Image (spheres, rainbow, N blue to C red):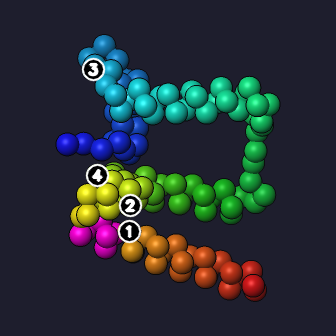
Amino acid sequence: MVSLTFVAPIGDLIQYAMLATGMSLRFGIAVVAGVVVGSFLTALLCRETRLQGFNTPQQMLRYIAGGALMGSGGALALGCSIGQGLTGLSTLSYSSLVSALAIVAGARLAWYAACRRQGL
C-alpha cells in the first residue's frame, strides 16, 4: 500500500528527465509534472504570473538554506511532513503521531522566535 507523496516522485521526475528512454512513466512522476504545469497554466489564465525577487541577499540565502534542509530531510526520511501528518495519522500510526506533534511544536517555536525577533 502506497500513499500519494511528492518527495520521491520529484527525484523520479529528475531521473526520468535524464533517462526518459530507460524508465517508464509512473503515476507519481505524472502527478508532479501535472502540478507544476497546472499551476503555471492557472497563473497564466488568471493573469497572476510575475517575477518576484528577494529584498536582501541574506534573505535569499536563508530561503536557499531552508529549501536544502527541507529537501534533504524529506529524502532522508523517505517522505515529507505532509505525508507523516496526513497519511500516517489517517492510519493511526504511532510514529506519525509523534512526528506530527514534533512538527507542530517546531512550527510553534519558529513562530515564537520570529515574533520575538520582530519585537511583537
* Residue ID at (52%, 72%): 107
* Residue ID at (26%, 63%): 92
Dot label at residue 78: 4
Question: What is the distance, in whole Å, between disc 4 and disc 2 at their CAs?
Answer: 14 Å
Asked if marks 4 and 3 touch (Cβ < 8 Å), the reply is no
Q: Is residue 74 visible?
A: no
Q: Is residue 65 left or right of residue 74?
A: right
In this rendered view, identify the residue nearer to me: 13 or 42: 42
Counting residues from the start of the chain, the first of labels 3 and 2 encountered is 3
Question: What is the distance, in whole Å, between disc 3 and disc 2 at their CAs?
Answer: 31 Å
Relative vertical location of residue 83 with respect to residue 94 in this rendering, above or below: above
Q: Is residue 65 left or right of residue 53?
A: left
Q: Which residues are magenta?
A: 94-99
Secondary structure at numbered mark 3: loop
Please tell me in which quadrant of the rendered image residue 84 appears: bottom left
Q: Amino acid at mark 4?
A: Leu
Question: The N terminus is located in which quarter?
Answer: top left
Dot label at residue 100: 1
Counting residues from the start of the chain, the first of labels 4 and 3 encountered is 3
Asked if marks 1 and 2 touch (Cβ < 8 Å), the reply is yes
In this rendered view, identify the residue nearer to me: 54 or 45: 45
Query: Which residue is situated farthest in the left direction here?
Result: 1
- State the residue position of label 2: 85
